[in-house]
Image (tube, rainbow, N blue to C red):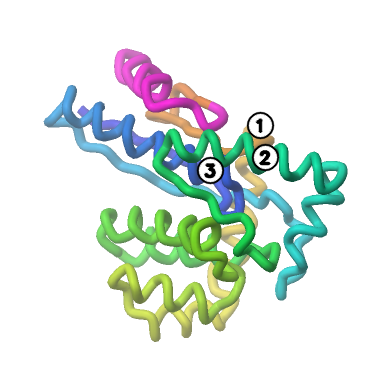
Amino acid sequence: MKMTVDVVSDVVCPWCFIGKRNLDAALQAWRAEQPGCEVTVQWRPFFLNPDTPESGEPYRPFLEKKFGGPKQLEELWQRVSEAGRRAGIEFAFEKIELRANTLNAHRLIHYAQTVGVDPAVTAALVEALFAAQFLEGRHVGDRAVLSAVAGECGMDAVAVRRYLDSDEDAEAVRSGADQARRRGVNGVPFFIFNDTLAASGAQPPEALLKVMRDASAA
């Protein structure tokens, strides 16, 4: 038995961080139910804010404009923070100074998935990128930061920096994001199980587990 999970997400999306944690819990339950099942998770790119400058731009002013003002933003952060706590996440939005362009973060994930990095290291990398953004307030659009995060996860930081300083796979990543939109993915996180059934949004672990069971039966 096999279970493939395609996760369409963006590392600057707080709901995607919650969705990842919920998926982790669902997969833990799935492996307990199906101990012989081979599980493969693939991370797919999505650009929440594709127009972000490469160097980034001030975070809070952008969000206040997007969501209608300081009060509306605080209310949104409150809702996200409450949902995050249920997933074991203590969001630190106040630490984030720059809205990041995530092309290079997606390239880093793409690199990890295509050069034979251990899947456990790739999973740790994705978690670390979310943590860098939402817990530590690091600029995940910066190549030096991305290389450092990769090194902290056991990857070769020098090789990663060399890769990021090129434009290798940039078009492949953009194409992957375009493909997701052509498939009808307009919001993230978005999960596709066994290329058969999908779940949209940061659904609780039990909901994701149910879709996994249905996809396996299908």
Q: Position of residue 174 (x, y in %)?
A: 64, 57
Of helix, strand and loop, which one carries label 1?
loop
Query: How packed is label 3: few (under 14 Cα within 10 Å), some, or many (20 or more)?
Result: many
Residue 52's x, y, as percent? 75, 62
Question: Residue 157 appears at what percent x and percent y?
Answer: 38, 80
Say which quadrant the C terminus sits in: top left
* Spatial separation of the CA atoms under disc 3 and disc 1: 17 Å
Dot 2 corresponds to which residue?
181
* Type of amino acid at the residue the image marks with label 1: Gly
Q: Which residue is mark 1?
A: 184
Near-viewer residue (7 or 152):
152
Query: What is the distance, in whole Å, between disc 2 and disc 3 at their CAs?
Result: 16 Å
Task: Tell me the SS state at disc 2.
Answer: helix
Residue kind at label 3, given as amino acid type: Cys
Question: What range of the chain is rendered magenta?
Answer: 200-218
Magenta includes 84?
Answer: no
**Left or right: 12 in relation to 186:** left
Residue that sits furthest to the left in the current view: 36
Give residue 16's mark.
3
Q: Nearer the viewer, residue 186 or 65?
A: 65
> Secondary structure of the magenta portion, mostly?
helix
| Pointer 2 local density, CA inside 10 Å: few below 14, some 14–19, many at least 20 | some
